[in-house]
Amino acid sequence: MTSDAVTLHVFCSVKGGVGKSTLAVACAKLLADAGRVPVLIDADLTGTSLADGLRLCAPEVETRKDRSANLAAPTGRLLSHTETVSARRARDRIPWEETPPPPVYLNDLLIHGHAQALVDEELTAECPVKPLLWRHELDDGVGYLPSSPLRTDVSIALSWLYRDERFTWIRRMTWLLDGMRQEKFGLTDVVLDLPPGVFGFSLEVMALMAQLAKDHVALPPGFPSTWGDGGWIGRPYLVTTQDRNDLLVAVDYFVQNRREVPTLKLLVNKRTEGFEAIREAVREHVGPVFNTLDGNALAPIDDLRGTLGALFQADGDLRVTSEVRALRQALRLPNGEVRP
């Protein structure tokens, strides 16, 4: 493993509404507070976007005569949050067929930009990634790549996520990640928020996590040749709640895949009952297999809705609490001081 390896924190779930995206945001912010250089990629392209939940500012890019975004020509300026909201509304009104208008979303980099062309199994890079990262209005030290919540973009994304094209999209995502690492702008961590449901694109990402858990990474032809050079550390998380209809399905997936993805950790979020009661429910469900599980593989997260809810308020920061320190430990993050 190289000393400058980038850690890839992947958040997935068997269904939506379990707090996966909130934990991904918290993870990225805690990394920044610990002095790391994280980028949060909002790969939940199913109709919601962190760009609407957080007060983010989009990077400005040059526009062509047809009002489409020139991804290869960022101006180096960030739009204000108000300008970003206006640009998002304008994009929703402008008809386009090939290259979309600004602001720049993850969708654009996957389809029209950095990973657009694979020629002779090599990437044709059309734009750098760093200048296209969004930032929080208060500059929290995190780089953001939000997905687009707009209907046209979501329709395209859904066809890629859940149909045969999903393999093409995971290949493009791998090129995008590799391109970010190769730019060498001090990147230390990438936090990847996946769509709900461990199938389609999310399933392919978990397969990628399985590859990273092995001593030798051998990806199929068409993937970056540098991916297996020890430059990535995989840390996947499967987020669930104590709701038995969610918890037990998540446990089934966890047990079935723990050998292929030994680094997978099950996070029980929004916990309000005793953790031993949850452990007993899991023990009863999976039987003797429970005794073979790593004691740290099942981690509780107390009810932090008041604390984590601050992420989506105007100031957008976490508060210093014992629960936040416990969250950092559950996510296997380095120590650091949360912003006051």
Image (cartoon, rainbow, N blue to C red):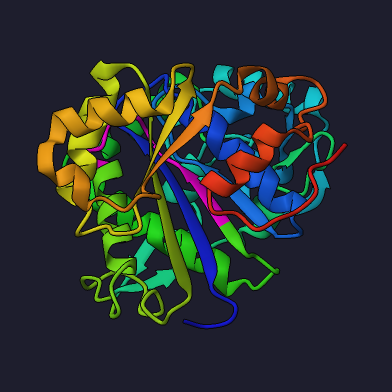
Report if residue 64 is visible in the image.
Answer: no
Q: Position of residue 26 (x, y in %)?
A: 63, 37
Whether residue 334 sits left or right of residue 136 in the image: it is left
Viewer-proximal residue, 215 or 324? 324
Residue drawn at (56%, 29%) of the image: 22
Q: Position of residue 88 (x, y in %)?
A: 64, 24
In which quadrant of the rendered view does residue 307 lie? top right
Question: Taking 262 as reference, is 110 above or below it?
Answer: above
- Which residue is rendered at x = 73% and y = 43% of the image? 59
Total count of labels: 0
Residue 252 figure quarter: top left
**Residue 186 percent location from the top left of the image:** 70, 69
Q: Is residue 339 magenta?
A: no
- The image shows residue 165, relative to residue 103, as above or below, that is below
In this image, 132 relative to 287: left or right?
right
In the rendered image, which quarter contains the C terminus?
Answer: top right
- The percent coordinates of residue 146 (x first, y second) are 57, 37
Q: Using residue 120 as the reference point, say whether residue 58 is left or right of it.
A: right
